[in-house]
Image (spheres, helix red, strand yellow):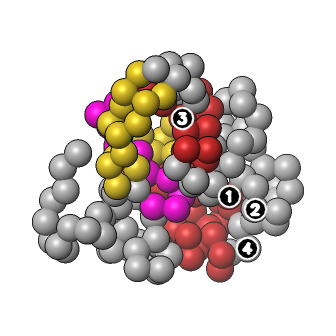
Amino acid sequence: MTRISVKVDGTTYQDEVEPRLLLVHYLRDRLGLTGTPVGCDTSNCGACTVDLDGESVKSCSVLAVQTDGGEVTTIQGLARDGEWTGLQRAFHEQHALQCGYCTPGMIMAARDLLRENPHPTSDEVRHALEGNLCRCTGYQNIVRAVLAAAEAPDPAESSQPSDPSEPSGQEVTA
């Protein structure tokens, strides 16, 4: 067993984990964060995409021990005080989902794109989401949602979740 300390959605966890435990299973099975789905376990579908230290990663291809000292944001860590981010609202308003299984990964990958490129073209959105598969929608509404979010940015959305135990306005360190 290996001891890790990782901040997930604003809360720091200290755990003993098997060195071979995948991050997706740590999030779901140990922390109960089931908003990150297991899609394929082969890093082909992108459904399990999360943010690790400021970059989107497929959590089925990252070991939990690799997050030691790091910070993870899941789909469940995006909303603030029950309020969706602009990107989450855009996915809802643009009907960018059908079954919803790929939606957490799509939103997390799109979030990464919008941090790097706040005003992407539709081709840039399609390129950025190449590693995330959807078997239901045909992608049109997903692209529309990302473009809509880019046009109406949510000023409350930051790259890291706030820690509800910390007074607002203070920086939280891991």
Three-letter amino acid code at disc 1? Thr
Three-letter amino acid code at disc 2? Gly
The residue that appears at 61% across and 38% down in the rendered structure is 25
Q: Are the residues tagged 2 and 3 within 8 Å (C-beta)?
A: no
- Distance in Å between CA atoms under marks 1 and 4: 11 Å
Residue 110 at what x, y percent from top left?
Answer: 54, 53
Label 3: which residue? 23
Residue 49 at what x, y percent from top left?
Answer: 58, 44
Is tag 1's residue or tag 3's residue first in the polypeptide sequence?
A: 3
Label 2: which residue? 100
Residue lying farthest left? 170
Q: Nearer the viewer, residue 123 or 68?
A: 68
Residue 117 at what x, y percent from top left?
Answer: 41, 51
Q: Which region is colored magenta?
A: 66-77
Residue 5 at what x, y percent from top left?
Answer: 32, 36
Asked which quadrant contains residue 59, the reply is: top right
Disc 4 element: loop
Is tag 4's residue or tag 3's residue first in the polypeptide sequence?
A: 3
Label 4: which residue? 95
Magenta stretch: includes residue 76: yes
Question: In the image, 139: left or right of 160?
Answer: right
Q: Are the residues tagged 1 and 3 within 8 Å (C-beta)?
A: no
Vertical comparison of 173 with 171: above or below: above
Q: Nearer the viewer, residue 54 or 19?
A: 19
Magenta stretch: includes residue 158: no
Can see residue 28? yes
- Distance in Å between CA atoms under marks 2 and 4: 10 Å
Label 1: which residue? 103
Three-letter amino acid code at disc 4? His
